[in-house]
């Protein structure tokens, strides 16, 4: 059996998401930005994304490939780097998530290839 046939694809994505959640030590990516707390967020960020929303999309089978999952990860990070100025904690956490999450995704992509 390969992972693809034995294990539903969404179980694989869920394990990748868990690894990204571990990297979010400041827990700033774990749920949607509260636009009541950050009133101008919607003026700058047109397509918000966060890890909880990605989990719900996995459950709804909305990802048909690792690339689609990766696109939402990259959207989440680019929103963070676009909205927050460079000297902020949020921006620095965005850089860290881009780098550490990128490594998680590269390994996941390699794992999928090996299993084919
Ligand atoms: C309770 C106030 O919460 C926030 O101000 C806040 C909380 C979470 C945030 C965020 C802001 N900004 C962001 O760019 C994304 C990454 N996360």
Image: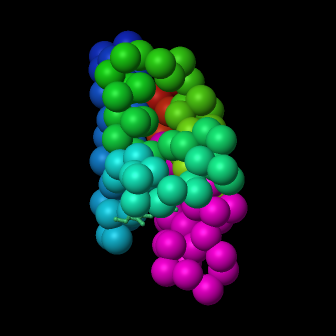
In the rendered image, residue 67 lying in the magenta stretch gets the answer no
Left or right relative to 40: residue 1: left
- The residue drawn where x is 61% and y is 86% is 87
Q: Residue 1, image x and y in percent?
A: 34, 17
Camera-side residue: 100 or 32? Answer: 32
Q: Residue 11, image x and y in percent?
A: 31, 27
As displayed, is residue 111 above or below residue 107? above
Q: Residue 27, image x and y in percent?
A: 33, 63
As displayed, is residue 54 above or below residue 101? above
Camera-side residue: 116 or 106? Answer: 106
- The residue drawn where x is 45% and y is 51% is 35
Q: Quadrant of ligand 1?
A: bottom left
Q: How is the image coloured?
A: rainbow
- The residue drawn where x is 58% and y is 57% is 40
As displayed, is residue 99 above or below residue 62? below
Residue 3 visible in the snapshot:
no
Left or right relative to 80: residue 5: left
Q: Quadrant of residue 80?
A: bottom right
Q: Main SS of the magenta segment? A: helix
Extent of the magenta region: 79-108
The residue positioned farthest toward the bottom in the image shown: 87
């Amino acid at each position: 059996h390969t992972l693809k046939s034995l294990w539903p694809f969404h179980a694989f994505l869920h394990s990748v998401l868990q690894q990204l959640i571990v990297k979010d030590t400041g827990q700033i990516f774990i749920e949607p930005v509260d636009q009541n707390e950050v009133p101008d967020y919607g003026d700058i960020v047109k397509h918000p994304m966060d890890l909880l929303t990605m989990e719900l999309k996995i459950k709804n089978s909305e990802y048909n490939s690792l690339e689609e999952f990766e696109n939402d990860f990259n959207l989440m990070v680019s929103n963070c780097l676009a909205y927050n100025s460079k000297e902020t904690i949020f921006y620095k956490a965005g850089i860290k998530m881009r780098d550490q999450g990128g490594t998680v995704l590269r390994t996941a992509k390699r794992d999928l290839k090996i299993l084919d």
